[in-house]
Every structure is written in structure tokens, then in C-alpha cells.
Amino acid sequence: MESRPITNTENVINSRELLTRIKWLEQQLNYRCSDAYSEELKALNAFSNNVEAAASVSTYEPGMDLVRDSYLEEYGKAAEESGTGNTSGASFSSVDFNGVVYWLRQGI
């Protein structure tokens, strides 16, 4: 089952999907060489390392959202409107993904 590519143009990236994509790319590269897969894996590993540096295991493992800086306000509004969470008092840590800032909501 192929996972979808993850790039720094996405508004929201789930940390669980990030880990799944990294594992999938690693498996694919065991069977064939692909420059595109290699470049994506390199970028995602760097992003993952940045996330791990900014997050605790309890935040990262459950599948927290990483929200693109330009989308953070809209994300907060959507979360409040849908009743899935109040982000007004939440603690966020910034994480770099190839020059684009993403915000990781810290766990309790």
C-alpha cells in the first residue's frame, strides 16, 4: 500500500503519517533506487529530527498535527468550530521543514 508524498506545501501534516511515509520510503529504497524517493526521505528525516527535538514522545507518537505557519489561525478556528479542540491556550513549538515553519501542538 503506497502512502502519499509529504511536502512542505501542506497545511497540516499528522506526525503518524510522517512516520508511516518515512518507513514506506525506506522499504521502497531497499528494493529499488529512486532519486525522488531518496530526496523525499532525506527531507522527511530532517523534518522528523526537528519534530523530535521540539516534542516529547507523548506528543509525537500519538499522531499530533503539525500546522503550517500560514494556516495556524485558520486551523484554530476550524478546531473550535468543529469542537475538536480549543487551541487558544495550547502550547505550540515551531519546527522547520525545508525553510517552512510548522507548529506542533504540545501534549498535556
Image: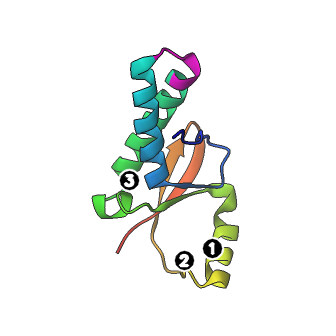
- In three-dimensional space, the C-alpha distance between marks 3 and 1, rounded to whole angstroms, equals 20 Å
Tag 1: residue type? Answer: Gly
Check residue 35 for magenta coloring.
yes
Secondary structure under tag 2 reads: loop
Residue 28 falls in which quadrant of the image? top left
Foreground of the two, 18 or 107? 18
- Identify the residue at image location x=34%, y=58%: 61
Work out whether 32 lies above or below 71. above
Residue drawn at 68 percent across, 77 percent down: 77
Determine contact: label 3, label 1, CB under 8 Å: no
Relative to 69, say whether 85 is above or below. Answer: below
Relative depth, front residue between 13 and 34: 34
Label 3 sits on a secondary structure element that is helix
Amino acid type at mark 3: Ala
Q: Which mark is residue 87?
A: 2
Q: CA distance from mark 1 to mark 2?
A: 6 Å
Quadrant for the C terminus in the image: bottom left
Magenta stretch: includes residue 58? no
> Pointers 1 and 2 in contact (CB under 8 A)?
yes
* Label 1 element class: helix
> Which mark is first along the chain, 1 or 3?
3
Q: Percent x, y for residue 103?
A: 53, 58
Comes first in the chain, label 1 or label 2: 1
Which image quarter: residue 84?
Answer: bottom right
**Colour setup of the view:** rainbow
Q: Which residue is mark 3?
A: 54
Q: What's drawn in magenta, residue-wise? A: 32-37
Which of the 4 image quarters holds residue 11?
bottom right
Residue tagged by mark 1?
A: 76
Disc 3/disc 2 C-alpha distance (Å) = 18 Å
Q: Residues within 10 Å of mark 3 (few under 14, many from 20)?
A: some
In the image, which disc is placed on residue 44? Answer: none
